Image: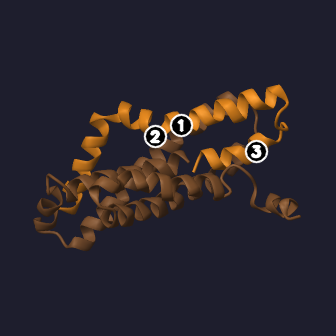
């Protein structure tokens, strides 16, 4: 949640603002760089912010919750890979949302896309646990 | 030129790092306190729940 929120927000919100009043996006697009590179740059900077947020939250969460099954230094590589791939994915989603959504409807993004993703995306319960709820 | 864009975005983030962390980390951390600390101690959720909660809070 921290990674996804950070990555999506850091790309989508400024982008909505850029497309809106200030038209800042036009300055960027007029820069002597291919538009694809500008999009790539947005994704990279959003992904970096996502990783920063996750790296900030992880030790605090471990501190608050105490020892957690399956969380060990041995899994460092896997955790890192998931963080990087996840933040790239969410930052790309944020780029898409930021361009699709019109300025005043940014609030809708959280109500209609982010909130269902958090609740029904099996973030707080295991996917396999749904099987027991089927009767 | 591409690098200049990245440096610019990094500068913006560094300037408002505290607000960035407040905006993105407060909600997951409060979730952690309630579902990972208070509720397991109250016995409302089982102890092993933290292992299912962390992957949700983090990414």
Pinpoint the chain carrying mark 1. Answer: B
In space, the residues marked 3 and 2 are separated at their CA atoms by 22 Å
Q: Residue at x 62, y 36 (%)?
A: B31
Q: Which chain is brown?
A: A
Which numbered tag is attached to residue B17? Answer: none
Characterize the local packing of mark 1: few (<14), some (14-19) or many (20 or more) Cα atoms within 10 angstroms.
Answer: some
Pinpoint the chain carrying mark 3. Answer: B
Chain B shade in the render? orange
Characterize the local packing of mark 2: few (<14), some (14-19) or many (20 or more) Cα atoms within 10 angstroms.
Answer: many
Q: Are marks 1 and 2 in contact (CB under 8 Å)?
A: yes
> In the rendering, at what x and y percent does residue A33 appear?
16, 69
Q: Quadrant of residue A23?
A: bottom left
Q: Earlier in the sequence, mark 3 or mark 2?
A: 2
Label 3, on which residue?
B51
Q: Residue at x 33, y 51 (%)?
A: A13
Q: Are marks 3 and 2 on the same chain?
A: yes
Label 1, on which residue?
B27
């Amino acid at each position: 949640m921290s990674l996804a929120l950070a990555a999506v927000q850091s790309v989508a919100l400024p982008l909505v603002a850029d497309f809106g009043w200030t038209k800042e996006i036009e300055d960027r697009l007029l820069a002597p760089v291919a538009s694809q590179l500008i999009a790539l740059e947005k994704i990279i900077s959003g992904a970096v912010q996502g990783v920063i947020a996750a790296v900030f939250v992880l030790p605090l969460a471990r501190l608050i919750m105490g020892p957690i099954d399956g969380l060990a230094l041995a899994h460092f590589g896997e955790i890192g890979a998931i963080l990087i791939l996840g933040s790239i994915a969410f930052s790309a989603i944020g780029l898409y949302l930021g361009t699709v959504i019109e300025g005043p409807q940014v609030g809708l993004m959280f109500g209609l896309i982010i909130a269902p993703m958090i609740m029904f995306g099996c973030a707080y319960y295991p996917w396999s646990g749904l099987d027991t709820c089927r009767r | 030129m591409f690098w200049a864009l990245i440096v610019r975005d990094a500068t913006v983030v560094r300037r408002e790092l505290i607000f960035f962390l407040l905006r993105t980390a407060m909600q997951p951390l409060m979730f952690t306190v309630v579902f990972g600390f208070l509720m397991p101690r109250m016995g409302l959720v089982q102890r092993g729940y933290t292992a299912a909660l962390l992957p949700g809070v983090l990414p």
